[in-house]
Image (spheres, grey):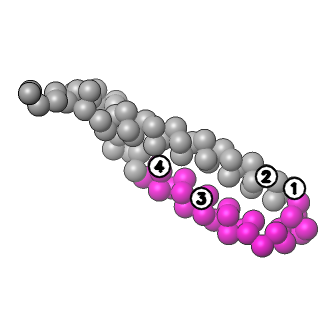
């Protein structure tokens, strides 16, 4: 059996791969802060518009995290 050959990443792909852990951490931190703000539900009573905006942003972060994690898997795996 021959060892799996690792695909050489382009400069742009390598930079993207290098930046992904920091991006993922930032998204996770933002999502944690939003979850803490929305956790007790009082924000909905005090400032419903802001609460809805934060809930929408949380959903956007979920999508961005999934995209970033998928991209990290693609770029980080041998081809």
Q: Quadrant of residue 11?
A: top left
Who comes first in sequence, dot 4 or dot 2? Answer: 4
Report the predominant secondary structure element of the magenta stretch. helix
Residue located 74% across and 55% down the image: 54
Who comes first in sequence, dot 3 or dot 4? Answer: 4
Secondary structure of the residue carrying tag 2 is helix
- What residue is disc 1 on? 49
In the rendering, which numbered label is found on residue 23? 4
Q: Is residue 10 above or below residue 77?
A: above
Q: Residue furthest right?
A: 45
Magenta region includes residue 33: yes
Alpha-carbon distance for marks 3 and 2? 13 Å
Residue located 82% across and 58% down the image: 50
| Residues at discs 1 and 2 in contact (Cβ within 8 Å) | yes
Secondary structure of the residue carrying tag 4 is helix
Q: Is residue 21 above or below residue 35?
A: above
Q: Quadrant of residue 2?
A: top left
Magenta region includes residue 26: yes
């Amino acid at each position: 059996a021959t060892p799996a050959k690792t695909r050489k990443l382009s400069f742009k792909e390598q930079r993207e791969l290098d930046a992904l852990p920091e991006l993922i951490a930032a998204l996770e931190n933002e999502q944690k802060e939003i979850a803490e703000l929305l956790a007790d539900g009082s924000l909905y009573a005090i400032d419903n518009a802001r609460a809805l905006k934060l809930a929408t942003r949380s959903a956007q972060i979920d999508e961005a995290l999934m995209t970033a994690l998928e991209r990290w898997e693609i770029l980080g795996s041998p081809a």
